[in-house]
Structure formats: structure tokens, C-alpha cells
Amino acid sequence: MKDYMSQGSSSFLIKNEELKNGYKSLFVEFLHNEGFKTWGRKGYYSGIDWIYVNINNKRYAFGVPGIAVTEPVGEHAITIKEFKIIYEIYKKYNPEYPLNME
């Protein structure tokens, strides 16, 4: 599994005030429970309320002011609630069989 944030077109940009809690955020706890890992703590800035989440390689990275970590799906941020809906849809499918539907 590749370890970079820009793998495919699968990184979502999520924005929410709760993310200002950084690595102690409830959303980051959710990601950890789902098997996601941090891309690294390099460049983390206190008070950041956006995060990139790649569903292909299960990596996430907090935003950095003035730097686009990767180009997000749809070129716009979404909410935590919207991300969870999208993620639930994709996690039920086996990536080895991209055309099989359940």
C-alpha cells in the first residue's frame, strides 16, 4: 500500500471546528478506529480545523496554512457527516473487484 496522500483521486478535505482539537479530536479517534494512520505529524499547526483523508491508503494529514497537501476530491471541503456517508458506501466494497456491486 502506497503511503502518500495524493494516491489516486481519493483524498477528501474535511473541515470542522472539532478538528481544532488536533490529534485528540473525535474525528481522528474515529479514523483510528477504522484503521487510518497519520501521514506524519510534520507541519501540524495548533488550531487547524481541516484535515485531508485518503480512503485508498487509509492515511490522513492535518492541513497546513498556505499549503495544499494534495488536491481534494471535488476541489472543495466537505463536512465530517458527509465524509462518513461517503466512507460507509465505499468501505462495503472490495477494492480487488471494482465493478462488483452489492
Image: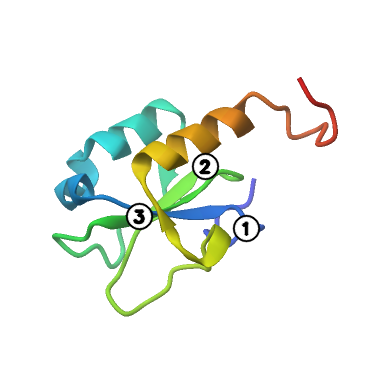
Q: In the rendering, which numbered label is found on residue 58?
A: 2
- Quadrant (top left/top right/bottom left/bottom right) for the N terminus: top right
- Quadrant (top left/top right/bottom left/bottom right) for the C terminus: top right
Give how far across and how far down residue 43 sits, in percent: 28, 68
Number of residues whose C-alpha sits closer than 10 Å to that of mark 1, classed few (under 14), some (14–19) or many (20 or more):
some
Please name whichever residue, 74 or 41, is drawn nearer the observer in this view of the structure: 74
Disc 3 marks a residue whose amino acid type is Ile
Give how far across and how far down residue 95 sits, in percent: 74, 34
Disc 2 marks a residue whose amino acid type is Lys
Disc 1 marks a residue whose amino acid type is Gln
Disc 3, SS: strand
User: Can residue 40 be seen in the rendering of this structure?
Assistant: no
Q: Is residue 30 above or below residue 12?
A: above
The residue wearing badge 1 is: 7
Give how far across and how far down residue 77 sits, in percent: 41, 59
Q: Quadrant of residue 18?
A: top left
Number of residues whose C-alpha sits closer than 10 Å to that of mark 2, classed few (under 14), some (14–19) or many (20 or more):
many
The residue wearing badge 3 is: 51
Pointer 2 or 1: first along the chain: 1
Pointer 3 or 2: first along the chain: 3
Furthest residue in direction bottom, as rendered: 66
Q: Residue at x 30, y 69 (%)?
A: 64
